[in-house]
Amino acid sequence: MNKLNVRFFSIGMLVATIIVLLYGFFFNNESNKTDQAEAKEGYTLVENNRLDLFNEKIANLEKENEQLKATIESYKKEKSKEQKEVVYKFQIREGMSLEDIAKGLNGIYIITDQKDFVKFMVKNGYEKKIQPGEFSFKQGMSNKEIAEMITK
């Protein structure tokens, strides 16, 4: 090998090194750019040991959530039993109209729709048989049960 070949070889190595360094300098930032792009989209980079901690916390929260759901369901069942046992008293006075009675029963949540109750009473002939007095009602009673109770 002569000196000229060695010089060209060394110049080639120097140019190749410069190209590699420039490539690394300009194009190595892609990983940082993707990290920044992911952060903008709402992603977060997490180490594996911290990821395990997060997964453990999530599992604990899911267990707690299931326990709370069970507690809520049992509370709802108890509440519905209590509501069925509640008795509401309502007094029908002499001279009250059917609309007044329907409005009063709707006010204590014995009936859900005043118009339907009035139509039922008129259609079945109960509106003329209503008796004054104090009556005890439970929620969930049908229009027929209410009509029979107040017309005795």
Image (cartoon, grey):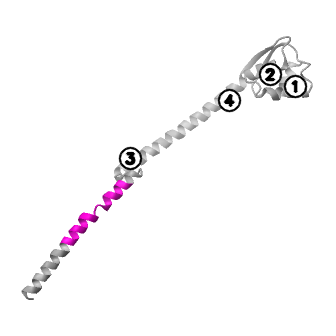
Q: Residue 13, position in %: x, y?
A: 16, 77
Q: Do the residues labelled 2 and 1 touch (CB within 8 Å)?
A: yes
Q: Do the residues labelled 1 and 3 touch (CB within 8 Å)?
A: no
Q: Which mark is residue 102?
A: 2
The residue positioned 40% from the left and 46% from the top of the image is 54
In terms of secondary structure, where does tag 3 sit? helix
Frontmost residue, 57 versus 3:
3
User: In front: mark 1 or mark 3?
Assistant: 1
The image quadrant where one finds the C terminus is top right
Seen in the picture, residue 31 relative to 102 is either above or below; the reply is: below
Q: In terms of sequence position, does the residue under pointer 2 or pointer 3 come before the other?
A: 3
Indicate the amino acid at tag 3: Leu
Residues at marks 3 and 4, CA–CA distance in whole angstroms: 41 Å
Residue span colored magenta: 18-37
Which residue is the site of mark 1?
Answer: 121
Q: In terms of sequence position, does the residue under pointer 1 or pointer 4 come before the other?
A: 4
Q: In terms of sequence position, does the residue under pointer 2 or pointer 1 come before the other?
A: 2
Q: Residue 56, position in %: x, y?
A: 42, 46
Q: How many discs appear?
A: 4
User: Label 4 neighbourhood size at 10 Å, few (<14), some (14-19), many (20+)?
Assistant: few
User: In front: mark 4 or mark 2?
Assistant: 2
Q: Which mark is residue 53?
A: 3
The residue positioned 65% from the left and 28% from the top of the image is 79
Q: In terms of sequence position, does the residue under pointer 1 or pointer 3 come before the other?
A: 3
Q: Residue 45 carries which label?
A: none
Residues at marks 4 and 2, CA–CA distance in whole angstroms: 24 Å
Q: Residue 124, position in %: x, y?
A: 91, 27
